[in-house]
Image (cartoon, grey):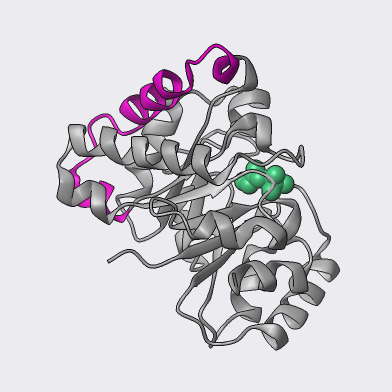
Amino acid sequence: MRIPFIAGNWKMHKTAAEARAFAEEFKALYKDTDVKTAICAPFVHLALLKEAFAGTDIKVGAQNAHFEDQGAFTGEISVKMLEDIGVDYCIIGHSERRQYFAETDETVNKKLKKLFEGPIVPILCVGEVLEERDAGREKEVVGGQIRADLAGLSADDVRKLVVAYEPVWAIGTGRTATPEQANEMCGYIREVISELYDDDVACDVTIQYGGSMKPANATELMAMEEIDGGLIGGSSLKADEFMQIIDF
Ligand code: 13P
């Protein structure tokens, strides 16, 4: 059975003092819930958040990692470094990384393989841009990303995967996909995974929706059958707002 999973993606926001203040406020608001919860923060805040959330069910995620173990890769962070500080999740292939930092399906695939060597659970982001949706190509695009990103991964690994469907036109725009649009694509992603593996694996994969998800629309999105959770940008920056989404 899939457990609802709401994760915040802070992107490039917050100083250390702001991250600490969020953690204290969020811990005070956080109630025991059946919803899995994580904050994916900038690298420099991961250790402090792990410490702040120790003894709670609140998990911590990174927003990227390199696919090599170590080496001359100035500015990069390895999976081992993240494991070492107890990071639980790692976002891979966010559209902002694909768009601004030359992330490709090939590097995404390598990163997923590296993460699956250890305990950190990847949150794989996929999604089409507006022109692709307007041209009716959204399934072709997202299906293509899933096939390329998962190439060579075992069924046992994919079972543990979290996929976030984030239509690029809905990110930070205030323009949310309708629950039906989001549900249809999440269902389609499950279909493609079923084709690549089997129904059983597809049924285990947690699929989140991301893109202008907020307290006002979380209930209707989370009510959809194929949507197991949310990857929340802007609305995860304020503890009370993020908590309202978890309380959907
Ligand atoms: P917003 O919630 O700010 O639209 O961002 C979504 C997102 O990109 C999460 O990864």
Q: Quadrant of residue 62?
A: bottom right
* Magenta residue span: 132-160
For residue 208: magenta? no
The residue at 49%/58% (across/down) is 229
The residue at 67%/73% (across/down) is 243
| Residue 122 image position (x, y, % from top left) | 42, 50
- The number of numbered discs placed on residues in the rendered structure image is 0
| Residue 225 image position (x, y, % from top left) | 39, 54
Nearer to us in this view, 28 or 247: 247
For residue 155: magenta? yes
Q: Quadrant of residue 3?
A: bottom left
| Location of residue 94 with respect to 225 vertically, above or below | above
Residue 77 seen in the current view: no
| Image quarter (top left, top right, bottom left or bottom right) of the N terminus | bottom left
Is residue 119 left or right of 248 when viewed as pictured? Answer: left
| Residue 179 image position (x, y, % from top left) | 54, 46
**Residue placed furthest toward the top:** 135
Is residue 191 left or right of 156 when viewed as pictured? Answer: right
The residue at 50%/82% (across/down) is 33
Is residue 206 left or right of 72 when viewed as pictured? Answer: left
Is residue 211 left or right of 1 when viewed as pictured? Answer: right
| Location of residue 135 with respect to 169 vertically, above or below | above
| Residue 73 image position (x, y, % from top left) | 57, 33
Nearer to us in this view, 139 or 152: 139
User: What secondary structure do most residues of the magenta stretch adopt?
Assistant: helix
The residue at 45%/61% (across/down) is 83
| Location of residue 207 with respect to 59 vertically, above or below | above
| Image quarter (top left, top right, bottom left or bottom right) of the C terminus | bottom right
Nearer to us in this view, 104 or 6: 6
Residue 222 seen in the current view: yes
